[in-house]
Amino acid sequence: MPAKDIRTKTIDELTDELAQLKKEQFNLRFQKATGQLENTARVKTVRRGIARVKTVITEKTSS
């Protein structure tokens, strides 16, 4: 999800998005450990998505 779309969401929506991304990250790590992960690039994408959401949450709460 582009940062432009993330910035239009409220803090509650961002918190929900963060929880969803962390759950997906956990599932991807579990798949990797069991050897079932097919799309290894998705791990990097999810990690960056988490960073984007956390950054926007920090920006919104500090201002």
Image (cartoon, rainbow, N blue to C red):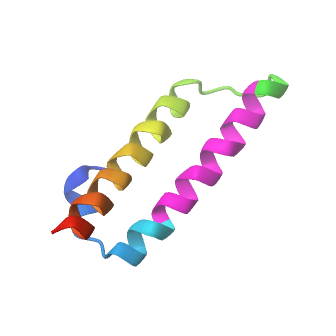
- Can you name the residue that lies furthest to the left here? 63
15 sits left or right of 3 in the view? right
Q: Residue at x 48, y 59 (%)?
A: 18
Residues in magenta? Answer: 17-32
- In this picture, is 30 found above or below 5? above
Q: Is residue 28 magenta?
A: yes
4 sits left or right of 36 in the view? left
Q: Position of residue 57 (x, y in %)?
A: 32, 62
- In this picture, is 22 found above or below 33? below
Q: Residue at x 24, y 51 (%)?
A: 3
Q: Position of residue 36 (x, y in %)?
A: 78, 28
| Quarter of the image that includes the C terminus | bottom left
- In this picture, is 45 found above or below 53? above
42 sits left or right of 51 in the view? right
Q: Position of residue 40 (x, y in %)?
A: 58, 24
4 sits left or right of 9 in the view? left
Q: Residue at x 71, y 28 (%)?
A: 37
Q: Number of marks in the image?
A: 0
Q: Residue 14: which quarter of the image?
A: bottom left
- Can you name the residue that lies furthest to the front here? 62
Q: Residue 59: which quarter of the image?
A: bottom left
Q: Position of residue 58 (x, y in %)?
A: 29, 59
Q: Residue 11: which quarter of the image?
A: bottom left
Q: Nearest the camera: 20 or 54?
A: 54
The dominant secondary structure in magenta is helix
Q: Is residue 11 magenta?
A: no
Q: Residue at x 19, y 56 (%)?
A: 4
